[in-house]
Amino acid sequence: MQIQNVSPEEIEKKSFEIISRTLKETGNVPDRENAGVIMRCIHASADFDYARTLTFSKGAVCIMKELILSGADIVTDTNMAKAGINQKKLSQYGGTVRCFMAEEDVRKEAEARGMTRAAVSMERAAKIGRKVIFAVGNAPTALIRLHAMMQETGFRPDFVIGVPVGFVNVIPAKELFAASDVPHIINRGPKGGSSIAAAICNAVLYEMSS
């Protein structure tokens, strides 16, 4: 194989051309509504499994766009995901990317209650008084706590991106929302991560500004 001479501005374009061509060749062409999200997740991971494991509730991408247009915030379960989401584009619609994981009072409360910081962070996010898109890329306990809040208090998330990565409780946590009526984008199986959560958010934001 030879090294290609590709200008910096052409690298992403060429990458997406390769992804699109490969999906066609393997018979995994995504539907038009969800293609942008699927392709950006593949771009972020070089993993074509996302073409078959990403699961979308009915009209999920359109609902997420409507929430962003209404000024919704995005709350993540890692500062890595927060850093990866295009804050500048979200702010054009009045939204902010938030993560409560590193706050000292969250740490203390989590220790006192015997919970993860991610679970406590979801409770904090539910009280900010704004519409929220929950983007969970690391902690299944965040999804588990969100679902428990729905049962305990009647709280209903506006939107859930559920793509935690790992092996302990990851798949069951995702399935809680895959089987719910909450608007969602879920990646079935153990794969995911902060970069995938950010990629999903950015895919929708880029579509809105294209």
Image (cartoon, rainbow, N blue to C red):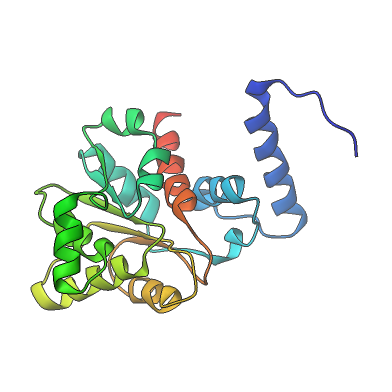
Residue at image point 67% right, 25% down: 10
Viewer-proximal residue among 97 and 208: 97
> Percent from the top left, x then y, of residue 82?
35, 43
Residue 140: where, in percent of width, then height? Answer: 36, 69
Report whether residue 197 is seen: yes
Write the residue at 10% across / 55% down: 127
Q: Report the residue at 39% width, 34% height from top.
A: 86
Q: Looking at the image, is 180 positioned above or below residue 26?
A: below
**Count of picture labels:** 0
List x then y, in percent, for residue 113. Answer: 15, 72
Q: Is residue 200 left or right of residue 131?
A: right
Q: Classify residue 151 by image quadrant.
A: bottom left
Question: Which of the 4 image quadrants contains residue 31?
Answer: bottom right
Asked whether, in this view, residue 145 is left or right of residue 28, the answer is left
The quarter of the picture where the N terminus appears is: top right
191 and 132: which one is in front?
A: 191
Can residue 156 be seen?
Answer: no
Q: Can you give x and y, in whole percent of width and height, for residue 7 in the image?
A: 71, 20
Could you say which quadrant of the image residue 65 lies in? top left
Q: Is residue 28 left or right of residue 129?
A: right
- In the image, residue 14 sits, relative to residue 34, either above or below, namely above
